[in-house]
Structures are given as C-alpha cells and as structure tokens.
Image: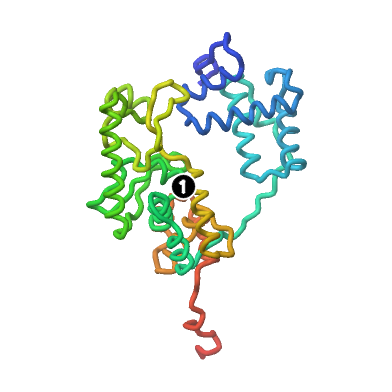
Amino acid sequence: MDNQAKFRPDPKLKLMDQVRQVLRYHHYSYRTEQTYCKWIIRYIKFWGGKTHPKKLNGRHVEKFLSHLATNNQVSASTQRQALNALAFLYNKVLFKSLEPEIAPIRSKKERRLPTVLSKEEVSALFRQMSGVHALMAKLLYGSGLRLIECVRLRIKDIDFDRKRIHVIKGKGGKDRSTILPTSLEDDLRLQIQKVKELHYKDLEQGYGYTYIPEALARKYPNAAREMIWQYVFPAKKLSEDPRTGQIRRHHVMESGLQKAVKRAAQKAGLEKRVTCHTLRHSFATHMLEKGINIRVLQELLGHKDVKTTQIYTHVMDRDISRLSSPLDDN
C-alpha cells in the first residue's frame, strides 16, 4: 500500500493531536496512546523542544536511543518501547522511513531467573490479605493471569460450567483460556453478584456504561450497558472517559493490588521481592512441579515461544533424592 492510500492526520492539528488521531484511527489502546505520546514528547525535548521531528531523521532517533542506553541505562524492553513509539511517529504520522538508518547502542538484554514463592510462602502471603484484593491475588496465582488481565476481566469471561477463564486480547492481542480454580468459584460468584447490584444502581441513575471496543459499540449501541460486559472488578467511582467524555465505570487501578501484595509480603515476613507477577511465576513453576506438559503450560500462560516458558524449568523444585547416578546403573 503506498502512502497515498494510508490514513493521513488532519494537517491543521498540532503534532501531538495528529499522533493521537492516528493512534485512535488504528485502534491502539489508551494505555499505548499515553506511552507513545510520552516517548515522542521526550524525544522532542531531547533535541531542544523546538525542532519539529520532520526536520530530524534516523540519526537523531539513533542518538536519542543510544542516550537512553548509555546515560539513562534503561532496560532493553524500555529502549524497544521508545523505538516503537518513534517508528510509529515517522512511519504512520510523518511518513518517513527510519528502520534502514537506525543502529543505536543497544541496552543489554539480561536473562534473569524469575522470583518464585514456595507453596508455604504463597499461603503465608494470602493469610495477610482479605477482600477483593485477596480474590484478585488468588486469581493471579491460581490461574496464571497477568495483573492487567485480571483487572480487565469481564463477567462474560468467567465460565463456571467449563471451569475456565477466558483472557481476551492478552499480551500481543491474543485470546486464550486458562484454569478457573474450583476453590474460588464461590468467591467469584459473590463478587459478580455485587457487581450486578452496583450495575443496577448505575442504570437507575442513568449510567451503567462501560468501555467496549469501538467496532462492537457501533454495531451494538446498547452493549456497553449490558451486564455481561461489566468488569468483574469495577472501580468504586464513575469516571469520565478521556477520549469520548462519556461517564463510565472502569475497572479498578492496578496500583491498588500492587500495594496490597507488597504490604502482605512485608507482614508475612517474606524475604524476597514479591510483586503481582511473582504469583504468575509461582503458578507456572508449581504447575511444572505437578508434571504438566510444558506445551500446555505455554498455552495457559499465553507465551508466544516455548523458550519463554522453559525458564521456569530452572527454578522448579526437583527431588534429587529420587534420581540415580549413571554409575549406579551399571
């Protein structure tokens, strides 16, 4: 497709408004929009704040990315995120190709073993938690969910009959299914009942909307007020959608659970750096220790490559006492 056939932003708009217009045209998430805009503004400020990016080229991008690696010592993933944002700016907004020109100093990508809790440590952690945060943390461990996947769960994503949780548009935009722990069924049903009661109150007050994908919203105008689309873990307060201005009930913020897990780890006396992602690491490791096939685990976790899943084989607990030396086989 040539540039003439591509979507072009309104030239009357300011640069960052053009960037947002193109991001929304291509249906990027609001989170990605915020991240890309942050990097583009940082890039512009790096070059003095007054030079328009169209007057800069790949060498300028290269120096900026090298600066992030050498002076700011950012991780490889952070540097790659900055590159993606600037590639979007030049390729989709300014229509200037960058890739052949860029060869920045790369941040070193280090492969570290994940922090994993023992089953006893997991139990100790959960004893220090209660309420919704406890339920969410148990889902991270019991189903192997990522934090953002947990907070974005909708009522329709919980399949009690088949004991599955459906993750829609997880990392990489992929859908998958994972385990619904039997021990959490009652708590989840109670949580969903609370969501229904809250939703009925919102409807009575003329609200009841939640976010749904734009294409679906156009096809089914009333879907955003349907029960099945409501978040399992909704925010306490209604809020204004930053893109449309509509008053909606969003999901809870990730920071609430992050803080709750950190506090619980401290109270439990766990001498490890425990985060929400530690619970997902622990799920993967304990599943391998139970004998699950690594390919099945790869599907449950939503990993693109089995090599990512294989890292858990380095931290799983092996019963060395049951192994025999090759010398004893003679």
Horizontal side, residue 263 vs residue 288: left or right: right
Quadrant of the rendered image containing residue 91: top right
Q: How is the image coloured?
A: rainbow
Q: Tell me if I can see residue 300 in this picture.
A: no
Q: Position of residue 85 (x, y in %)?
A: 60, 31
**Camera-nearest residue between 91 and 278:** 278
Horizontal side, residue 192 vs residue 3: left or right: left
Please determine whether, in this image, residue 116 is positioned above or below residue 150.
below
Q: Tell me if I can see residue 183 in this picture.
A: yes
Residue at 58% across / 58% down in the picture?
Answer: 273
Residue at 68% across / 21% down in the picture?
Answer: 53
Residue at 30% across / 53% down in the picture?
Answer: 187
Q: Position of residue 195 (x, y in %)?
A: 30, 40
Residue at 43% across / 40% down in the picture?
Answer: 252
Badge 1 amino acid: Leu
Which residue is situated farthest in the top direction here?
Answer: 12
Please determine whether, in this image, residue 138 is positioned above or below residue 232.
below
Q: Position of residue 265 (x, y in %)?
A: 52, 59
Count of numbered circles on the image = 1
Q: Residues within 10 Å of mark 1 (few under 14, many from 20)?
A: many
Q: Position of residue 203 (x, y in %)?
A: 27, 28
Label 1, on which residue? Answer: 147
**Camera-nearest residue between 220 and 329:** 220
Quadrant of the rendered image containing residue 168: top left
Tell me the element at label 1: helix
